[in-house]
Image (cartoon, rainbow, N blue to C red):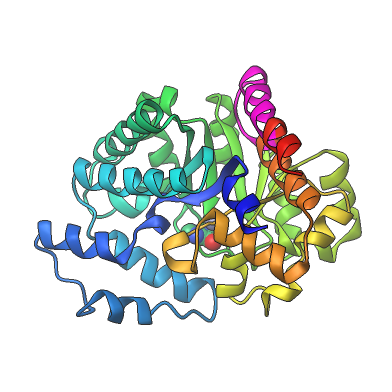
Amino acid sequence: MENFIQQIPKAELHLHIEGSFEPELMFKIADRNKIKIKYKSVDELKAAYNFNNLQEFLDIYYAGANVLLTEQDFYDLTYSYFKKINEQNVIHTEIMFDPQTHTDRGVKFSTVINGIKNAQDKAKEELGITSKLIMSFLRHLDEQSAFNTLEQSLEYKDWITAVGLDSSEIGYPPSKFKKVFDEVRKQGYLVVAHAGEEGPPEYVWEAINILDVNRIDHGNRSLEDNNLVKILADNKIPLTVCPLSNVKLRNVDKIENHPIRTMLNQGLVATINSDDPAYFGGYMNENYSAVANALDLSKEDLYQLTLNSFNSTFLEENEKVELINKLDEFYKNNN
Ligand code: HPA
Ligand code: ZN
């Protein structure tokens, strides 16, 4: 099974590039930029990765991102992620970035996106990995800040496929961002939103009915509402589920109780993703292995989850077919 997981061609749909910032690279970049980190060593930093909830994680995640200043920094961060997923046979990825985390510190929007885009181009050329970019608004900031960010993005519209909503969930419902997402869609972007990670099913309803999302990030708490499950299943609205993240942030008490199998059984288009792999103990393969072992998933289950991912990408239909053919070819020969 481990070989199967390693080798099956995969797509990642829920990944915060700032969450792929490995401690070793963080220290290297901090050094280069002459910024002091409050932890003395990589080990001391890693020891702090013990979270009781989303907010405790976010506090450390934003602190880590503070050392990123130059285009080279964003390039190095992004290309390191690509090298890692290349070892794991991830052949397509849709990367989220949080511009406000950087622009609020005086880093230019152009610095952030140029660094990321150069890494995407290099990864396509050198590793054959295709990718899309999702710009996420921080929901703990106000709607005006999101509007300002949207405005800054327009110059780079061709590089950005979708706009999302992340950060602290409870108390910041999707409805708070109705106006800006109306404009986001008018500008031609697709829409995703974190919902139902810590927040209630009502936030998932709002993401669907008010933001008109193409996918839900996480969505776990949808399972508390049968009518919502039916809407998600009937409309084939994908959920980008992140098993190790859910355990690390204590939204699921232990991996054996992860709801991914229930989601499949209820006809939901669930997918497996890593969220913030540098902080949560693993990239795609570690997430696959964790649920496969804990829930005794079959190769067919893993194939279904992976097929869901490819079907849920923001690629053109013909591009999807090409990647799904690769997946099917693999499955035919390894089943
Ligand atoms: N939830 C909300 N915001 C985030 C997350 C998450 O899991 N990771 C990075 N930003
Ligand atoms: Zn996330």
View extreme (top): residue: 318
Q: Nearer the viewer, residue 253 or 174?
A: 253
* Residue 99 location (% of width, % of height): 36, 46
Viewer-nearest residue: 55 or 126:
126
Decide if residue 178 is in sight here.
no
Residue with the most extreme front position: 333
Instruction: State the extent of the magenta-drawn residues as a range.
Output: 312-327
Q: Is residue 207 above or below residue 226?
A: above
Tell me, yes or no, whether the highlighted magenta stretch contains residue 33. no
Residue 176 place in picture, x, y as percent: 59, 52
Quadrant for the C terminus in the image: top right
Q: Is residue 313 above or below residue 257?
A: above
Q: Is residue 262 left or right of residue 144?
A: right
Residue drawn where x is 65% and y is 26% of the image = 320
- Residue 314 part of the magenta-drawn span: yes
Question: Is residue 225 placed above or below 257 in the rendered structure?
Answer: above
Q: How far across and down, in percent of the image, does residue 100 sit?
A: 36, 50
Residue 95's place in the image compared with 256, above or below, is above
